[in-house]
Amino acid sequence: MKTLKTALFAGIALSMAVGSALAEDTLRLGMTPEPYMPFTQVNAGGEWEGLEADLSRALCEKMAVKCDINQMAWDGLIPSMKENKVDFIIGAFSITDERRQVVDFSTPYYTEGTSFVGAKADTSEIKTADAADGSGKIIDPASVEGKIIGVQTSSVQSAYVAKYLTGAEAKSYDTADNSVADLIAGRVDYVLIPDLYIQTFLKSPEGADYEVKVEVPKNVVLGEGVAYAVRKGDAATLEKVNAGLDALEKDGTTQKLVDKWIFGKK
């Protein structure tokens, strides 16, 4: 995600034009304007776009509520919800046991993978091995001993490096874009990053000299899908969100949006 000017993070509340104009209920939705496609961004025209933007519009309409968007930095979403500044949040949040301790998750609307990316000129062989805790296959720690790995702070990828790749140095960034920028600059050897996000970079001219070294095997630390997060114990909001997501799944809306934004189908 690219860092935007501080003014964007001043807690400006924007109203999303969804739901009934006469709806009595209002829910405060926390989102980040930092570009993180295909999930979301604010385009040059000041409009929200991407899978999560379109899904949120459809969800709020399904719930028959007015959704007020509060835009803020990604790493401020969970703290803001804990402080009761917003009711629910979206930001490509992977469902993990660690996050379950502080938030409640909706049913997932997408499942994504994680990629380990480096320069094509780097001929090091990145292998997988059995995790010592019996959780399955992981990146072989010996393959990355002494290497610097870029990760986004507070991400599941950051947790993965801390748990399994202790012989490597994790370098944390506020946004995924900044971790990739340091990969290009040679300040990190690799990035551990969501696969959908990095594919856009790899297809660009700037990404021509980089490649996926290994698709990271699925692991409990990397989450159980991507979902909305609701304040811990807020059963009423969670019920509304899940009912809306269930309706969108059944009428095909969620799949259509995934096809559009993830797979490029019209």
Image (tube, rainbow, N blue to C red):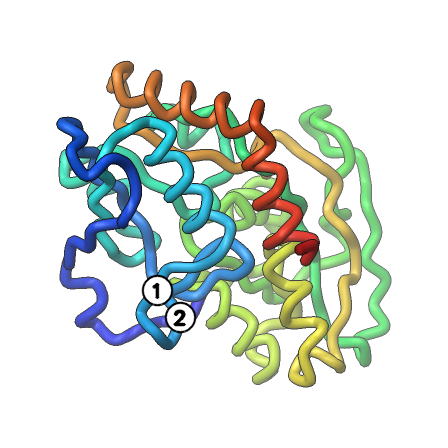
Q: Secondary structure at mark 1?
A: loop
In front of the other: 18 or 262: 18
**Residue at image location 13% in from the left, 27% down from the top:** 24
Side (left or right) of 260 relative to 78:
right
Q: Which mark is residue 55?
A: none
Residue contact at pointers 2 and 1, CB within 8 angstroms: yes
| Picture coordinates of residue 15, whole percent (x, y) | 20, 51
Side (left or right) of 85 relative to 48:
left
Quarter of the rendering occupied by the N terminus:
bottom left
Side (left or right) of 32 relative to 201:
left
| Picture coordinates of residue 120, whole percent (x, y) | 80, 76
| Picture coordinates of residue 258, whole percent (x, y) | 61, 45
| Amino acid type, label 1 | Glu
In front of the other: 190 or 21: 21
Instruction: Find residue 55 and report its image quarter.
Output: top left
Where is mark 1, residue-wise? 47
| Amino acid type, label 2 | Asn
**Residue at image location 49% in from the left, 70% down from the top:** 177
Instruction: Find residue 66 and report its image quarter.
Output: top left
Q: With respect to residue 111, does 207 lie above or below?
A: below
| Picture coordinates of residue 72, whole percent (x, y) | 25, 56
Q: With respect to residue 76, does 129 lie above or below?
A: above
10 Å neighbourhood of mark 1: few (<14), some, or many (≥20)?
few
**Residue at image location 51% in from the left, 69% down from the top:** 179
Q: How many marks?
A: 2
| Cα gap from disc 2 to disc 1, whole angstroms | 5 Å
Q: Secondary structure at mark 2?
A: loop
Quarter of the rendering occupied by the C terminus:
bottom right
**Residue at image location 47% in from the left, 34% down from the top:** 227
Where is mark 2, residue-wise? 43
10 Å neighbourhood of mark 2: few (<14), some, or many (≥20)?
few
